[in-house]
Image: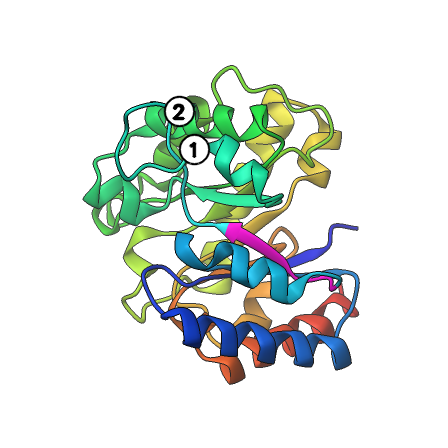
Amino acid sequence: MRHLMIAGNWKMNKDLFEAKAFTQGLKEHAHKHNDPKVEIVIAPAYPFLITASEIVKGTSIKVAAQDVSINEDGAFTGEVSATMLASLHLPYCIIGHSERRQYHKEDDLYVNTKLKQLLKNGITPIFCLGEKLEERETEQTNEVLKRQLDNGLSDITLFTGKEIVIAYEPVWAIGTGKVATPAQAQAAHNFIRNWLKEHYSAKVADTLQILYGGSVKPDNIKELMLQADIDGALIGGASLKLEQYTAMLDTSIEVIKLK
């Protein structure tokens, strides 16, 4: 059975002191409330990655980066490479988030290059994809997901399904307060899993974790996590408050016992 992953994407929030306080509080909570089948991941901003990593050292909590450069090194002011992230021993990095696609004009092939950089450096990509509102309303969801999967995973070999994590995040649900119904989310996740089975193998499809993201909160996470093909959540705003994030962790621990 696939484990659940509860990943908090802090985006451009928290200063150093806030990041320290949150991470320390999470460490204390996880010490008392944990289950090895529920993986805890936090994604602070670049300046606080090493600090967060040092705080959680020796615990089951993992630290992820929010993005990575397509370049290996060189004169790219402000960029952070996969080799730099690898030197911090980070296990995960988010790529393809809709905010990067929208604000920085990153297309599928650009995301594919980032994915290859991460795999080359031993970092597991959390590969985000999802449709816009107009695409959902015109029944193009599966078409959009297929395009993003075809292009984003172009020339990517998956043997076990552990090489990457996929996060389905409908763009219309990110930061809007709207959330896909459990049935809508399950349908999209099932489409992705069937695509993986068709293009790789049943083993890869059955093993690979597919997270849901988009206005996930303590009051809706349980119904979402109970869906057969949803293996966790990539959480934005609700991951910024320790009490909300730990509440979602506790709910996920309850859910994993029911799945």
In the image, residue 103 lies at what x, y percent?
20, 45
| Callout 2 amino acid | Asp
Location of the C terminus (image quadrant): bottom right
**Looking at the image, do the residues carrying marks 1 and 2 touch, with CB atoms under 8 Å apart?**
yes
In the image, residue 215 lies at what x, y percent?
39, 67
The residue range painted magenta reads 59-64
The residue at the point 44 percent across, 23 percent down is: 150
Q: Work out whether residue 94 or residue 196 is closer to the camera in this orientation and state it.
A: 94
Say which label, 1 or 2, has the lower sequence index: 2
In the image, residue 5 lies at what x, y percent?
63, 57
Q: Work out whether residue 95 or residue 88 is closer to the camera in this orientation and state it.
A: 88
The residue singled out by tag 1 in the image is 81
Cα gap from disc 1 to disc 2, whole angstroms? 6 Å
Q: Which mark is residue 73?
A: 2
Q: Work out whether residue 259 or residue 164 is closer to the camera in this orientation and state it.
A: 164
The residue at the point 64 percent across, 77 percent down is: 251
Q: Where 14 sits versus 136, above or below?
A: below
In the image, residue 190 lies at what x, y percent?
57, 44
Q: Where 230 sits versus 254, above or below?
A: above
